[in-house]
Image: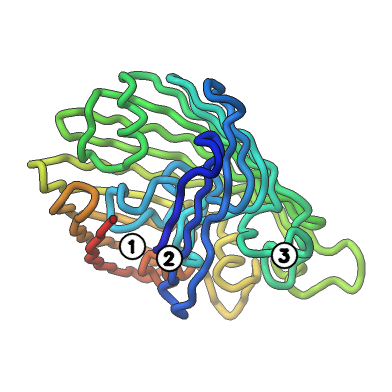
Amino acid sequence: MIGLNGHVVTPNLQFYLMSNVTSTGGGETLQDAYVTYRLNDNSPFKIKAGQFIDPVWHESNVGDGHLLAVDRSLVGAILGGNNGLNNDAERVQGVGVQYSSDMIRGEFDLTDGRDTANTPFFNTPFAPGLPPTNFGMSGRAEVRVLGDDTAWDGYDSLSAKDDKSDSIIAGAGFEWTEASNFDNIFLTLDGEYTSPKGLDIYAALLEDYAAFSDDGQPPQSAINQAIAGTYPNFGFLVQAGFMLSPQIEPFARYDLAILNSRFADVLAFENNKPGNGSKATANNHEFTVGVNYYLFGYQAKVSGDLSFLPNGSAVDAPGLGILANQNHSEWVGRVQFQLAI
C-alpha cells in the first residue's frame, strides 16, 4: 500500500490518497481519493467528497495496522464492508458531512451506491447482469459512553496495545443502495471496551436485507429471474485481546453469518434454486485464535492466527485467504509481518 495525506493552503482543507496492489492479478488499484474541509477553525463539521471506505462498519474502517487478528472477519466480508470478497474494503463515491465532538462522532453520505469504487457516476451495476444503481446513502454515529479524551484513540484500534483508559464506545450505522429492481439495506450495532490493563473487547451485530425483483418488463434477464426474492440475513462477531507483556498479545475471535438459505445459494451459484443437489453454506462460522508480537509498537509487528470454519464458506474471500467450500470444514492459517513508515 502507498498512501499520501496532508493539507493544501489551510489546515482545514485535508486530502487523503491510497493505492494498493491486490493479492490477485498484481495490478495497482486506487482505493481512497478524497478531501475534507472544516468549515472554520472551531467548527465540529467537515464536508467530505471523493472515493472512500463506507463509514457504516467500524471493523472496516480501522486501519490495517491496528487490527487484532491478521485480517478482518468473514461475517464482515459477507454482511458488511470488509475486504475479502474483492480484496478491498467496500468503497463508495460521494459527498457527505462529518461531525466530531468530545462525546459524539458521526457521518452521513450521499453516494453512487454500494461498491462503486473506480466507476463512473452513471451506469454502474451492483453486479454483472443487473441494472445500474440509482443512488445510495449511508451514515454512522458513535458515542463515548465511558472514558476520558484518550478513549477515541483506543477505539481507533481493535488491539489492546497502548490503551490508556477504561472506556466504552458504542456505534451504529446503516446503508441503503437502490436500483430499479433491488434494494439492499445494511444495519450494524457495535461496541468496544478498552482497559489500560491491556484488555480490549469488541462485539458487533450485522444485518443485510436484500430484495431483488425481476425486470418487470419482458424479456426478463436470466440473472434477474434466478435471484429474485427477499432475503433477510444476520450475523455477529465477538473478539478479545489481552497484552501479556508490552510485546505479546494473544487473541480470540468468533463470528457467524446466518444467511437465508436461498440467498446463500444466490451468493454461491447466482441462482436461488441451483438444483442438482447443490446447497450453499447458510451458517458461516469462523473460529480464530492467534497472537501478535510487537517489535516496535504498531510500526512493526508480526501476527499469526489459525481459523476453523466447520461448515466452510458460501463464497470465496481471497482477501482473507478463504475459499468457498460448501458445507465442508476448512482450516486457514496466516502469518503476517507489518511495517508502517
Q: Which label number is shown at residue 125?
A: 3
Q: Which residue is mark 2?
A: 313
Residue at 27% x, 30% y is 194
Camera-side residue of 291 and 45 = 45
Q: Secondary structure at mark 3?
A: loop
Question: What's the amino acid at mark 3?
Answer: Pro
- Name the amino acid, label 2: Ser
Query: SS of the residue at dot 2?
Result: loop
Q: Count the numbered circles shown.
A: 3
The amino acid on which the numbered mark 1 sits, given as a three-letter code, is Leu
Q: Which residue is mark 1?
A: 309
- Where's residue 76, x and y in %? 45, 52
Q: Find out whether the residues at labels 3 and 1 contact each other: C-beta distance under 8 Å.
A: no
> Is 128 located above or below residue 291 in the figure?
below
Q: Estimate how packed mark 1 is, as few (under 14), some (14 to 19) or many (20 or more) residues with alpha carbons within 10 Å.
A: many
Left or right: residue 185 versus residue 289 is right
Question: Callout 3 environment at 10 Å: few (<14), some (14 to 19), or many (20+)?
Answer: some
* Upstream in sequence: badge 3 or badge 1: 3
Residue 336 placement, left or right of 228 = left
Distance, label 2 to label 3, CA atoms, is 25 Å
Please tell me which residue lies in front, 18 or 186: 18
In this rendering, is residue 145 above or below 196?
above
Q: Can you name the residue that lies furthest to the left here?
A: 245
Foreground label between 3 and 1: 3
Identity of the residue drawn at 53% across and 55% down: 32
**Spatial separation of the CA atoms under disc 2 and disc 1:** 7 Å
